[in-house]
Image (tube, helix red, strand yellow):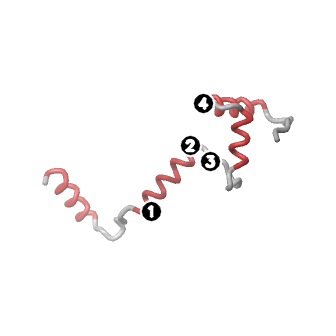
Amino acid sequence: MKTKLTLTVNKQIIDSAKRAAKKRNISLSQLFEEIFSQDDLTMVKTESQKAAERLLRSLSLSESIENKRDEDLLRQHISKKYG
């Protein structure tokens, strides 16, 4: 069942929400429903935050270079480039 809701929100927030809904080709009501129907309501993530999470995940899976000396890293790089 759908019910009307009236909110009092800062104009800048409203404009931002309208732009986000328009960018996704959905209504503001649909955007609101999508956000609050998600399982994890602790935080709605921006695209930048999602990208940062992806980067951190990929970095955590990558090989650590902590134990390699600079000379070894340089030698490895030159070998890859010219080898």
Residue drawn where x is 28% and y is 67% of the image? 69
Relative horizontal placement of residue 27, taking residue 10 as reference (left or right): left
N-terminal-most mark, 4 or 1: 4
Circle 3 Cα neighbour tier, 10 Å, few/some/many (<14 / 14–19 / ≥20):
few
Residue wearing tag 1: 60
Residue 77 spot, x, y in % from top left: 22, 56
Of residues 59 and 76, the one drawn nearer to the viewer in this rendering: 59
Q: Amino acid at mark 3?
A: Lys
Residue drawn where x is 52% and y is 53% of the image? 53
Circle 2 Cα neighbour tier, 10 Å, few/some/many (<14 / 14–19 / ≥20):
few
Q: Nearer the viewer, mark 4 or mark 2?
A: 4
Vertical position of residue 37 compared to residue 20: above or below: below
Vertical position of residue 75 compared to residue 12: above or below: below
N-terminal-most mark, 2 or 1: 2
N-terminal-most mark, 4 or 2: 4
> What's the CA distance linking mark 3 and mark 4?
16 Å
> What's the CA distance linking mark 4 and mark 2?
13 Å
N-terminal-most mark, 1 or 3: 3
> What's the CA distance linking mark 4 and mark 1?
32 Å
Label placed on residue 47: 2
Residue drawn where x is 66% and y is 48% of the image? 44
Q: Amino acid at mark 1?
A: Ser
| Secondary element at tag 3 | loop
Label placed on residue 23: 4
| Secondary element at tag 1 | helix
Relative horizontal placement of residue 55, taking residue 23 as reference (left or right): left
Residue wearing tag 3: 45
Residue 83 spot, x, y in % from top left: 13, 54
Of residues 23 and 30, the one drawn nearer to the viewer in this rendering: 30
Circle 4 Cα neighbour tier, 10 Å, few/some/many (<14 / 14–19 / ≥20):
few
